[in-house]
Amino acid sequence: MMTEKTILTMTEMTTISNSSIGSSKGKAAAAVIVAAGSSSRMGKNIKKEYLPLNRGTVLSQTAAVFLGTELFSTIVVVCPHDGKAAARDALLKGNALGKEVQGASDDGILLNGAKVIITEGSDTRQGSVLNGLSVLEKQTDKPQVVLIHDGARPFASAELIKSTYESALKYGAAVPALQPVDTQKEIDESGTIRRHLVRAQLAAVQTPQGFLFDKILEYHRRAKNQNAECTDDTEIWDMFSNQKTHVIPGESANIKITYPKDIAKKEEKMIRTGLGSDLHRLVEGRKLFLGGVEIPFEKGEDGHSDGDVLLHAVTDALLGASALGDIGSYFPPEDDKWKGADSKMLLSYVWNDIKNAGWELENLDCVIKLEKPKFLPYRNQVRASIADILGVEKERVFVKAKTGEKLGDIGQGLAIEALATCLLSSVKSV
């Protein structure tokens, strides 16, 4: 989670917002996510990468972590033969990867600033990886570094992905690994101990494994030409390169799902509630905004930004639930850079931080207190607007209105107030 906030100008925030649907050129990394296996140990007709996880699937959660790092120009997902449609459905199920910007096709899906391409694999993992690397070679923005990852490892952290990328860039090849907990032995064909191994010199490697792209593509092709069979990509690298693979600390949570119980035991769901409120005077000469929707009326909110009292309350509720601050710490009212700011943009920026901290919206419930105008004709439009900003289904957002019964500033039409409460959830690995 972020512990310190950097306040950006509106121009910088617009750039950040547009980057999620803009060009991915200039990014030095790509990824190959391998999901072409048969999942034979999961049981009959079960594809482990397509099993439900959180609101998506194992595969969509795996890809979402890579997309969230914003390191990658292209992500290639390698699926079984004749399995593109099923892989696409698993990737997009539950909207786990964010909004789909362009339709899916053989050219890929543009998601969160990266192109996601689905391609068919081979009858071996090694062949499937080569297929994925070959797809990357054809891209106009060919990467400097590629990370190769198992599609059934959805619990790798963004920090591990970034560390692997940085180490591969520095050393040529990098792999996360853990020292075994149990003492290891080498056994012979008869089932007796052949050699006692030194545990401190052993490592159980994981993925993602990172490499200089041109080199690992060359080595994979050389391995294929020599009919060399390797268990992972570091073995192929070490077979042909004079640069040793650099080992970085792995993560105990970064297991490869092999059996159905591997999913159930890894999830621990946290629930947080948040409460937000805001109050503004109603004055002539200002527009009335509620939830990002302009409501026809002779008065509007008097505020430093556009005065959208509802979006301000929503923003504070979400920040309170995630414990990342409040709207004043993000956008100080004494700072002229926020004068007249679009509250939709402010909420979008805050929500991006909250999502990056691992939170998802379960539901949002709001109350608007105003005497005039009648809110009911605009309710569905306002709900849809808030849902669109947050990238969630409209059914997760509800807004209702109450009058002041002619009492107080609200009842006299002098002010407008909004209250918002939210429920956020986060699934962490244990």
Image: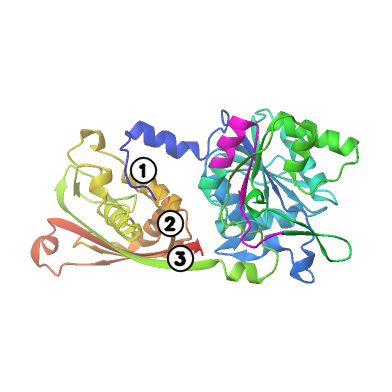
Residue at 26% in and 49% down: 327
Residue at 20% in and 67% down: 403
Q: What is the x, y in percent for residue 380?
A: 40, 61
Is the Cβ of the residue at disc 3 closer than 8 Å to that at disc 1?
no
Tell me if residue 23 comes above or below residue 35 in the rendering: above
Amino acid on which the number 3 mark rests in the picture: Glu
Q: Residues within 10 Å of mark 3 (few under 14, many from 20)?
A: few
Tell me if residue 362 comes above or below residue 202 in the rendering: below
As for residue 170 lying within the magenta part, the answer is yes
Sequence order check, earlier mark of 3 and 2: 2
In the image, which disc is placed on residue 314?
none
Residue beneath label 3, please? 395
Q: Which residues are magenta?
A: 163-184
Give the Cα distance between marks 3 and 2.
8 Å
Residue at 55% in and 63% down: 55
* Residue 16 visible in the snapshot: yes
For the rendered model, the colour scheme is: rainbow
* Displayed quadrant of residue 376: bottom left
Q: What is the x, y in percent for residue 70?
A: 52, 40
In the image, which disc is placed on residue 345?
1
